[in-house]
Amino acid sequence: MALSSLSLQQRYLFDTLGFVVLRGVLSTEEVDLVNKGINKYSTTQFFEREGALRNSPLGSSGRRDCGSFLTWSREDGGDVLRSLLCHPTLYPVLNQLCGEGHRLDHKPVLFRQPNGCEGFDLHGGAVRKDGVYDFPISYHCQAGHMVCNLINVAVQFTSSPRGAGGFVVVPGSHKSNFPYPSCPEELQTMADTYGYQPECNPGDVVLFAEACLHGAAVRMAPEERRVALIRFAPATCAFARGYLDQHSQFYEFLTEAQKAVVAPPYHEAYDRVKPRTVNGVLTSEAAVAQGRRHDKKEFDKGVFKGEYF
């Protein structure tokens, strides 16, 4: 599959609204395979949020979360899920939004939201409650280049028609210069009045900036909502730290290209490994796109006792 980035219209929408929906990223067959895996592990690998761990007081039950889905077998949709780390449709778009060499941030989560299940209270926002600019999740655009310090990739495995509950966003809030309300009643009013829920079909992907005020509404449809949430950041940025634990869970199942996306934060000038493309097509391999000069490495070995300072 040849690589392609956001269209001019999609760039405009993301810069203006803080989110964009990519239609049909996964095929029906891929979605069915993942849903088969979810059905298989629904009672053994998904953990319900209860009590103080609830994301919202609204709803009859807590969300069900799974953090081990990248270890699933090919027959249970594991290859499909792992492909999302370095997907030919998503990779160039994330390079456009986070810069070359973007990397995984947070360990991915796959969650289920049955009928009546809680959503998630509004959170995020470009400015913290104390009025401080929240740089680690910030968004800006300079000279036509968009930079998301933390972006969410929400892959849909079920339908979310308007009003059925699910992802809600306050459009344009990624550019806000004021803190959002801290009062729960005001937040709920904001969600009900200004929140927008994009309609999604299985296989669609919602990309949204963490700097957008966002959350989720209580699920109000017979079919449960199923979403894989994967977050990415620029090569030099980090928010969470679980990605550093490369010797547990899913790391051993990854291709070289996928492992490159899981690498810790550091600048591309220092031999950052990136997924490799051949004639515009993404491969499973990885390569150093820009290397540090050999003589500088040799000098650093004497000064710092290592190739890098």
Image (cartoon, grey):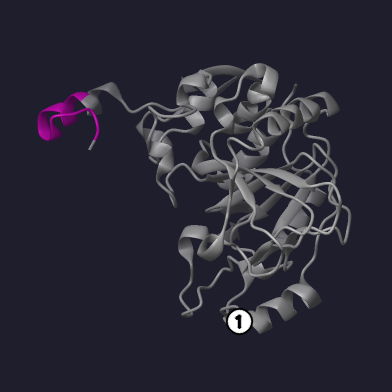
Where does the N terminus fall, quadrant-wise?
top right
- Camera-nearest residue between 279 and 55: 55
- Camera-nearest residue between 265 and 84: 84
Q: Is residue 200 left or right of residue 108?
A: right
Residue 184 rendering spot, x and y as whole percentages? 62, 80
- Camera-nearest residue between 251 and 101: 251
Residue 263 rendering spot, x and y as whole percentages? 43, 33
Amino acid at circle 1: Pro
Label 1: which secondary element? loop
Q: Is residue 219 left or right of residue 111?
A: right
Q: Residue at x 74, y 73 (%)?
A: 191
Mark 1 surroundings within 10 Å by alpha-carbon count, few (fewer than 14), some (14 through 19), many (20 or more): few
Q: Residue at x 53, y 23 (%)?
A: 257
Query: Could you tell me what secondary structure mostly forms the magenta stretch?
Result: helix
Highlighted range, magenta:
298-308
Name which quarter of the figure residue 33 lies in.
Answer: top right
